[in-house]
Image: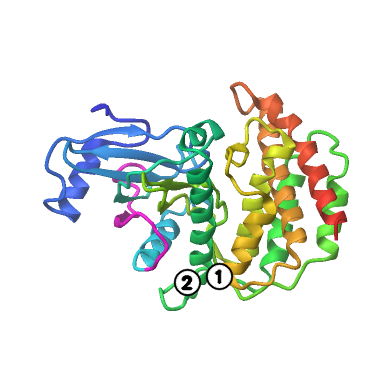
Amino acid sequence: MSEADPPGLDLRRLRAHLDRELPGTVSGPLAADIVEGGRSNLTYIVTDGARRWVVRRPPLGHVLPTAHDMRREFRVLSALGPTTVPVPPTLLLCEDDAVIGAQFYVMDFVEGTPFRTKEQLEPLGAERTRAIADALVDTLVDLHAVDYDSVGLGDFGRPAGFLERQLRRWKKQLDASRSRDLPGIEELHERLAARIPVSPEPAIVHGDYRLDNVLVGTDDRIKAVLDWEMSTLGDPLTDLALLVAYAERRTLDLSFVSNVSAAPGYPGTDELIDRYTRRSGRDVSALNWYIGFAFFKLAVILEGIYYRFSQGQTVGSGFEEIGAGVPPLVAHGNATLKED
């Protein structure tokens, strides 16, 4: 831990605010490290030498507060606290930009591992890897079973027309990232638009549910679900489909995407779907549409990253590879829809 201020977090101001709002919580000088690897909101681990907390704030220089709404993250975490869905306990939300330069919230630190690679899972063995993957699916079922009205999230989103809005949103994102011809992507969008399914009963949707967005304990249980910035009320099958799309990474050979599904013991796509279906009781007969949409969404996200790179707005290595990974996603999306 560094006693120097990490980018975007003034420890002196943070300490003063915590002492004022939560007197007696902090017992010593604060030190902090920024958590690397975050794609959007910034995450810091902060300690006074005795306890640890996590601080979340928007990215530096952000211009669209609605896209990095700390209140929404704090609200869904606080609402889920009393449920069976494991989330870090929340402590404080600060919407006063004057404290550290942006709104932020503080939650307890939860010990656990975010498994991102098959190399991390392999030493555990196939049996434990299977148990972790099963727990991942079961936790998603638990999330989708939460009565959102009873936990105060009845107005957390607009479930009506959710899929139509999602498809429009990601098509708009694609149109804003046009820098090259992408064979098949218009066909994929047209197929999706022509056969939007009727959504099941709405649920709390995480929006980016995968193994490296949860913390796993030494007992192979899910200790906390993280990264709720895309959460809303909507169609729960979008969460399942994205989990399946990430698992399909093994057939796409995209080195920059988490490869946990290639670890011995990790269940196959049919097994993931079957476990979710049996435990949730939901009808997944239209799931191929959702999986096709998940590949479309991932293709648009990666194309946006590649576009910023091609326009000189992003520096670093690996962006050419990300650009090369878009066509396989498009092809896989079209192939999935053709299966119906």
Q: Amino acid at mark 2?
A: Val
Residue range (magenta): 83-101
Q: Residue 265, position in %: x, y?
A: 57, 43
Image quadrant in which the N terminus is located: top left
Q: Between marks 1 and 2, how big is the CA–CA gap?
A: 7 Å
Residue in front for this viewpoint, 108 or 282? 282
Q: Residue 320, position in %: x, y?
A: 71, 25
Residue in front for this viewpoint, 122 or 77? 122
Q: Quadrant of residue 150?
A: bottom left
Q: Amino acid at mark 1?
A: Ala
Residue in front for this viewpoint, 242 or 193? 242
Say if 74 sits above or below 50 in the image. Answer: below
- Provide the residue designation for mark 1: 203
Task: Judge left or right: residue 19 versus residue 270.
Answer: left
Task: Judge left or right: residue 299 versus residue 132.
Answer: right
Q: Dots 1 and 2: beta carbons under 8 Å? A: yes
- Provide the residue designation for mark 2: 146
SS for tag 2? loop
Image quadrant in which the C terminus is located: bottom right
Q: Quadrant of residue 260?
A: top right
State whether the magenta stretch is mostly helix, strand or loop. Answer: loop
